[in-house]
Amino acid sequence: MHIISRKTLKKFYKQPDYRDAEGPLSAWFYEVKKANWETPADIKALYRSADILKNNRVVFNIGGNKYRLVVKINYPTKTVFIRFVGTHRELKWFNVDGHFAKSKIIESEVSYERKINPTKIHKGIQGGCH
């Protein structure tokens, strides 16, 4: 799978409060990079605790359930778009359809695909809108 973008993960775990997320997020990144997901069932086979949501979105539990990683998957192109990485508490601010409850400014999918830098909000890291 092609993951967009690793920079979002690094930006999160480079923060002093989240350095312990580096190992689990790196492990997730390399496992997913080697994966060949065609359906949500393929994800559940590798990540039993993952929550499969509508619109090809998935929530992964990271670091013993301490962190959440929300992605959107384009199965035909084998692309995983990182939408959010943060704590369980920070995820409460995030609407898995791609918006933060307190944010009116959301990047478009086109902007994200042009590799505009992710936006940091409420300490969690948000990727582009999908």
Image (tube, rainbow, N blue to C red):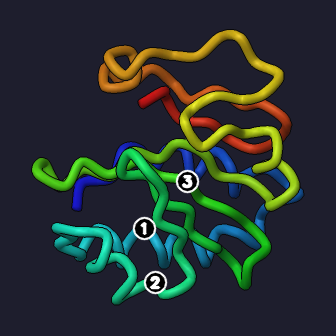
- The image quarter containing residue 126 is top right
The correct choice, above or below, for 7 with respect to 69 in the image is: above
What is the distance, in whole Å, between disc 3 and disc 1 at their CAs?
Answer: 13 Å
Q: At 34% across and 71% down in the image, what residue appears?
A: 32
Query: Which residue bears the numbered disc 1?
Result: 29
Looking at the picture, tell me which residue is in the foreground, 78 or 9.
78
How many labels sit on residues? 3
Q: Which mark is residue 70?
A: 3
Q: At 38% across and 45% down in the image, what residue appears?
A: 55
* Circle 3 Cα neighbour tier, 10 Å, few/some/many (<14 / 14–19 / ≥20): many
Dot placed on the residue nearer the N-terminal end, 3 or 1: 1
Mark 2 residue type:
Tyr
Answer left or right for 74 relative to 90: left
Residue 60 locus on image (x, y percent): 56, 69
Q: Which mark is residue 14?
A: none
Q: Dividing the image into 4 quarters, which one contains the N terminus?
A: bottom left
Mark 3 residue type:
Val
Mark 1 residue type:
Phe
Dot placed on the residue nearer the N-terminal end, 2 or 1: 1
What is the distance, in whole Å, between disc 3 and disc 2 at their CAs?
Answer: 13 Å
Residue extending furthest toward the top? 105
Q: Nearer the viewer, mark 2 or mark 1?
A: 2
Query: Which residue bears the numbered disc 2?
Result: 47
Looking at the picture, tell me which residue is in the foreground, 84 or 23.
84
Q: At 52% across and 42% down in the image, what residue appears?
A: 83
* Circle 1 Cα neighbour tier, 10 Å, few/some/many (<14 / 14–19 / ≥20): some
Residue 85 locus on image (x, y percent): 64, 52
Answer left or right for 77 relative to 97: left
* Circle 2 Cα neighbour tier, 10 Å, few/some/many (<14 / 14–19 / ≥20): few
Q: At 48% across and 57% down in the image, what residue appears?
A: 53
